[in-house]
Image (cartoon, helix red, strand yellow):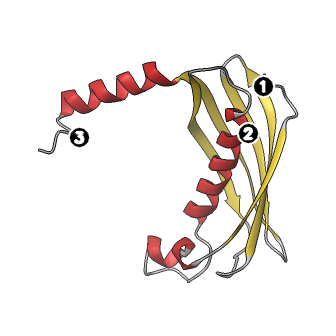
Amino acid sequence: MLTVGLTREATVRTTPADSATLVSPLVPDVYASARMIAFAEATCAALMAEHVGPGETSVGVGFQFTHEAATPIGMTVRVRVRLAELDRRRCVFEVEAHDAADRIAIGRHERFVVDREKFMARVRAKASASGAGTGG
């Protein structure tokens, strides 16, 4: 059961695949904001997965992050998430990320609990109506 105050921490060692240069060759070769946000989202999703019901999953719907310091590729990043708000199926997480030297990010991430099959049925219907996923 989801309850306010649940926390989770995770770490990842950054690799060249996490470089901001892969997002745009116009930016420095450091840990990309997009990769950091994805890591925070995955940590929140993993926490929720342990507490939702059978057939349920969660989807991310909001991101508010400030990337405060650059992290060199090869350095380990630790993210800590805390469920700060819970309103029925809506969950808001406080997120903080650190590397070995600095706090690198702070923010909030919002997720909703959804019925997996109903959600995917809507996605399939959308793909079918648009011709996406049909090979043409």
Location of residue 49 with respect to 24 vertically, above or below: above
**Circle 2: residue type:** Leu
Residue behind mark 1: 2
Asked if marks 3 and 2 touch (Cβ < 8 Å), the reply is no
Residue behind mark 3: 133
Q: Is residue 75 left or right of residue 5?
A: left
Of the numbered discs 3 and 2, the one sitting upstream in the chain is 2
Of the numbered discs 3 and 1, the one sitting upstream in the chain is 1
Q: Is residue 27 left or right of residue 67?
A: left
Q: CA distance from mark 3 to mark 1?
A: 34 Å
Residue depicted at 68% across the width and 42% down the height:
46
* Secondary structure beneath label 2: helix
Q: CA distance from mark 3 to mark 2?
A: 30 Å
Q: Position of residue 37 (x, y in %)?
A: 62, 56
User: Could you say which is closer to the camera, residue 28 or residue 121?
Assistant: 121
Q: Residue lying furthest front in this view? A: 54
Q: Position of residue 1 (x, y in %)?
A: 78, 22
Q: CA distance from mark 2 to mark 1?
A: 9 Å
Residue behind mark 2: 47
Mark 3: give few (<14), some (14-19) or many (20+) Cα within 10 Å: few
Numbered-mark total: 3
Of the numbered discs 2 and 1, the one sitting upstream in the chain is 1
Q: Residue lying furthest left in this view? A: 136
Mark 2: give few (<14), some (14-19) or many (20+) Cα within 10 Å: some
Residue depicted at 76% across the width and 24% down the height:
86
Residue depicted at 73% across the width and 78% down the height:
75
**Circle 3: residue type:** Gly
